Image (spheres, grey):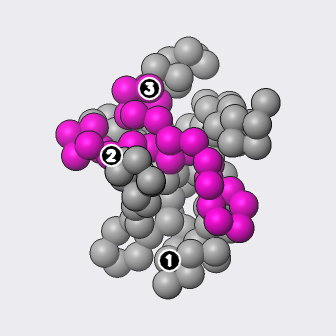
Amino acid sequence: MSQSGSQAAAFFRDVRVSRVVWLVRDDDGSPTHLSGDGTRSLPFWSTSPRAQSAAKIWGRGLRVDSMPLETWCDLVLPDSARDGLAIGINWSGPRLVGWSFTPEQVLDRLAATD
């Protein structure tokens, strides 16, 4: 399994247990990333240390925040789908890379882990 694959697997395993999703943000919201294929992703992490690492790499005054998994599933994922955003999962490394999924794929994967 690739590094991105193992990070994605860890995300779904971790949030299933903790019931918490982590993000980085500033007063204006969370950063998104535009990939080479034109897809914009909104990243999330499964643990506070993972999100803290991302905030440190990106800098720009970003801070770590969390939300209950239920809120994320009920509010953030539908809003992201409506806005055409993909969901970045446990991006890692010095350039913060990893897999992104559609919000629907995230919900399907979460349902498969229950």
Q: Residues within 10 Å of mark 1 (few under 14, many from 20)?
A: many
Please tell me whether residue 21 is drawn above or below residue 65 in the rendered image: above
Quadrant in the picture for the C terminus: top right
Q: Residues within 10 Å of mark 3 (few under 14, many from 20)?
A: few
For label 3, the SS is helix
For label 2, the SS is loop
Q: Where is residue 68 in the image (x, y as percent from the top left)?
A: 47, 44
Real-space CA distance between mark 2 and mark 3, rounded to the nearest whole angstrom: 12 Å
Quadrant of res 33 = bottom left
User: What's under tag 1, amino acid-wise?
Assistant: Leu
* Disc with the residue nearer the chain's start (1 vs 3): 1
Q: Which residue lies furthest to the bottom in this view?
A: 61
User: What's under tag 2, amino acid-wise?
Assistant: Leu
Q: Where is residue 29 in the image (x, y as percent from the top left)?
A: 34, 68
- Give the residue drawn at x 49%, y 84%: 60
Residue nearer the viewer, 14 or 53: 53
Front: mark 1 or 3: 3
Does the magenta portion include 35? no
- Give the residue drawn at x 64%, y 74%: 57
Residue 106 horizontal side relative to residue 81, left or right: right
**Residue at the disc numbered 3:** 105
Determine contact: label 2, label 1, CB under 8 Å: no
**Residue at the disc numbered 2:** 85
Please tell me whether residue 109 is drawn above or below residue 72 in the rendered image: above
**Residue at the disc numbered 1:** 62
Q: Residues within 10 Å of mark 2 (few under 14, many from 20)?
A: many
Residue 27 horizontal side relative to residue 54, left or right: left
Please tell me whether residue 1 is drawn above or below residue 23 in the rendered image: above
Real-space CA distance between mark 2 and mark 1, rounded to the nearest whole angstrom: 20 Å
Q: Where is residue 55 in the image (x, y as percent from the top left)?
A: 58, 72
